[in-house]
Amino acid sequence: MATIELRAFAEMQQLFKERGWSIPKTVAIPENGITGSDLIKQLDIPADNIEAMFVNGVAFGLKHAIKPGDRVAFVPQGIPSIYRVHLGFYSKENRE
């Protein structure tokens, strides 16, 4: 299997701490990649806790494909509106 580097923003860091995960956490994924949604399932993270993700520094929805070697960061629900614009995920339609 291939791997990715996984990080977390804000409240998601608490989940990493509770589970004893390092930041960044190396995660094994299939050689052909995985979607953000499938990665969340693999890691047993409630999907409602995650609003968006960054893949190699760019904001994407959870349907986006993650490839081996990517750097991924989950963004929790509830980021204030001004930051949403700056981070690039200001509406649900932009994250699909």
Image (cartoon, grey):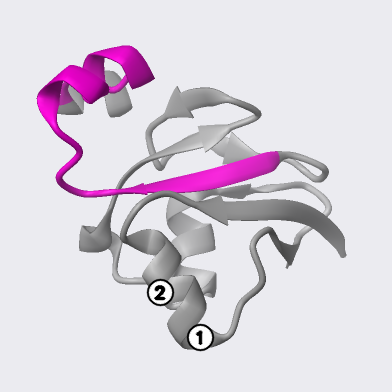
Can the viewer see residue 90? no
The answer to whether the residues at label 1 and label 2 have Cβ atoms under 8 Å apart is: yes
49 shown above or below 54: below
- Amino acid bearing label 1: Arg
Measured from the top left, where is residue 11 in percent x and y? 31, 60
Q: Please give left or right for residue 78 compared with residue 52 in the image.
A: left
Quarter of the figure that contains the C terminus: top left
Residue shown at 49% from the left, 59% from the top: 38
Q: Label 2 belongs to which residue?
A: 15
Residue under the point 38% across and 61% down: 12
- Which of 67 and 51 lies nearest the eye of the viewer? 51
Q: Residue at x 52, y 74 (%)?
A: 43
Q: Magenta span has 78?
A: yes
Residue under label 1:
19
Q: How many marks?
A: 2
Q: Which residues are magenta?
A: 71-91
Horizontally, is 48 left or right of 58 in the view? left
Name the element at disc 2.
Answer: helix
Q: Is residue 6 left or right of residue 46?
A: right
